[in-house]
Structures are given as structure tokens and as C-alpha cells.
Amino acid sequence: MRLFEYQAKDLFRNYGIPVPKSTFVKEASGAVAALEDSKSPVALKSQVLAGGRGKAGGISVVATPGQAAAEAKRILELSIGGEKPSGLLVEEAFEHEREMYLSITLDRGERSFVAIGTAAGGIEVESTTEKIVRRVPLEGIARPFAEEVANLLNLQGREADEFVPILLSLERLSREKECELAEINPLAAGRDGTLMALDAKVIIDDNALFRHPEFSKLHPEDEFEGEASRQGFAFVRLDGDIAVVGNGAGLVLSTLDLVGDAGGRPACFLDLGGGAQQDRIEAALRLANRLPGASRILVNIYGGITKTTDVAVGIKTVLSEGAVKPLFARISGADEEEARRLLEGSPVRLFSSAPEAVEAAVEG
């Protein structure tokens, strides 16, 4: 479960992580009132779960009531990644000299958290190669650990003094709320060494939500996650443009890796589970076809318990309903020749291996 920024920042405040003064509003008039209260420029930030808000025009700094009214109206009507904003975060601007990155990420394979920091943060952080990566001890982070990370980031004086409790708090938040990710990007440094979390991204492990009823009413259920849950799919929305559908968590995860290695960006993780029959195949494809931001669908099926012929018939049924996004498929396993025969003449692009299908899907 991913939290909206304003919800994540409320969580940060509760854990003592410094964030700018802000107000969540639903109307443009609320943005104007918040600007007048602050008596200084404010940032208007679209509250969507989709990534890339800044590049999409979902963040704007305004200084006058007229600007606030016009920009708030524009952003509230702006769809980002197919998603309409739930509101605006109106946040006091924080003057700063540079930006860093800090996160705590869950590593399921190692059953532990990992702390990641970079001396340069912001929208191009993915391209940064000089990352500080430290596995968090099972007992949690102690002050010497945080001081070591601060030192590796070349922080000194007040910046180092402020960084240490921020990292300690971020790790405690991640552990106590069972987060998959708690991220500050950017962590901004002011001229006097003050540090401030200018953005906040928190994803709670869905498998742990039953232990955290405090999150159950934070925001309405995502339409697609809700439908996937009712269908019994394991589903996670992602920020890319290739909807990835497969059977088996390991197969779907490896497909996501292949997409990433090929330079693509998955739009979702959708696991049909074992033994999926035709109706489940159809439901999964319809969901993937409606997913905002996804421009094509990649199906990677290994037929064991799942019948490849059921997959083929399910695909044909959905195709017959019309307006299906470009579909790339690798269907392997028992009866795969018959499945291929069933799809002959259809617009589905079939491949004999997953890497071939992935490469074609990434190229579009």
C-alpha cells in the first residue's frame, strides 16, 4: 500500500523527521488560503500515487493568490499516469543549496532492510552510480551505523548532527510500520546546515496491513488493486508502461527483472497464481488492458498446472472484445503447440523465449 505524500509526511512528523509546514487541500480556494497564511511562496504538489509528477507538470511554486488559484485549478484537473489527483499538498518553500537521497528498502531475499544514501538526490537519482548501500542489522540501526553513513556522504558539522537522527527515525519507522520502502528524495540541505525532507514516499507491505489498522482508512482502495484482490491476483501497480502478466510470483518477478535489464519499465506485477483457468486469464487481461499508463501487455506463462490452451482461448476471447493494447506473449509448457495454433492469425506476437518476448515488448 503506497501512501500519498501528505500521508507519508504526517508519518514522518510522528517520527520526528523534519518536513516543511504544509496543508492538504481539495479545492483551489484552499490553496489560496494556505498561501496567504504562509506569507511566503509555496509549492503546489499534485497528490497522485503515480510517479513523475514534476516532469508531468504536477508541481508548481507560486507566490501570489492569483498564481495560486490558476495553478491549483490546473493541477487539480491534470491527469498524471492516468490518475486524477486526490488533492493538493500546499507546502512552504524551503531554500536549500543541495539535495541528497536517503531510503530504507526491504530486501525480501535477505529478509532484512537496506539503507541507501547518495550525496546527490532529486529527479535524476536513478542515474547516480555513487550510492552508499548498507545492510541494516536485524536489531536495527544504532548511532555508530548512522554516523558512518553520514561520514560516507561527507556530511560534517550541523548536517551530520541532523542526518543521524533522521536516518535512525527512518529506519525505526520502516521497522515498526513494516514498510517495503521509506524514501526521502530529496533530503535538502539549507545554507545553515538544516536538513529537510522535501518529498516522502512510503510503501507499506500489503502482507502486514492486518497488523496496522491505522492505515486502513488513509485513502480509498485503488480501483485496480481492489479488482485484482477480488479476483485473487497478486497485483502491484508500478510506474512504467508495460503491463506484466504471468503465473507464479517467481516467474513474474524474473520477468520484471528482464524488462528492467532490457531498458523497459513495468506498469504492474500481476500474478495469476497456479492453475489459472480461462476466466481468470480473461479477467487478468481485461484489467491489464484498462491499466492507465500501460501502453502494451507482456504475458509470460509456463504451462504446468495452468493449461496453455486455456491461456490461448482466454486471450482470443479478450481480443474478440476489441480495443486490446499490443500484446506480446511467451507461452511455454504442456500443449504449447496447440496453444500457438489457437492464436494463429491473431494480433498477438508470440515468442518462444521470455527474453525475446521482453525485448519485443520493450521496443514496442
Image: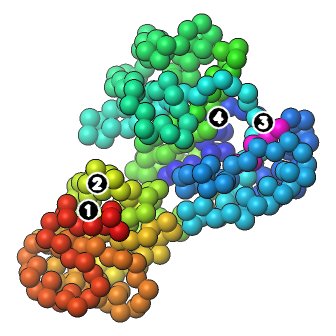
- Residue at mark 2 to residue at mark 4: CA–CA distance: 32 Å
Q: Earlier in the sequence, mark 1 or mark 3?
A: 3
Tag in front: 3 or 2: 2
Secondary structure type for disc 3: strand
Whether residue 325 can be seen here: yes
Residue 42, magenta (yes or no): yes
Residue neighbourhood size for the residue with mark 3, other residues' Cα within 10 Å, grouped as few (<14), some (14–19), many (≥20) = many
Up-down: is 284 above or below 137?
A: below
Say if mark 2 contacts mark 1, CB within 8 Å: yes
137 horizontally vs 55: left or right:
left
Q: Which mark is residue 92?
A: 3
Task: Identify the residue shown where x is 35% and y is 92%.
Answer: 320
Secondary structure type for disc 2: loop
Q: Earlier in the sequence, mark 2 or mark 4?
A: 4
Check disc 2 and report the residue beneath it: 262
Residue neighbourhood size for the residue with mark 4, other residues' Cα within 10 Å, grouped as few (<14), some (14–19), many (≥20) = many
Q: Residue 172 versus residue 256: which sits nearer the camera?
A: 256
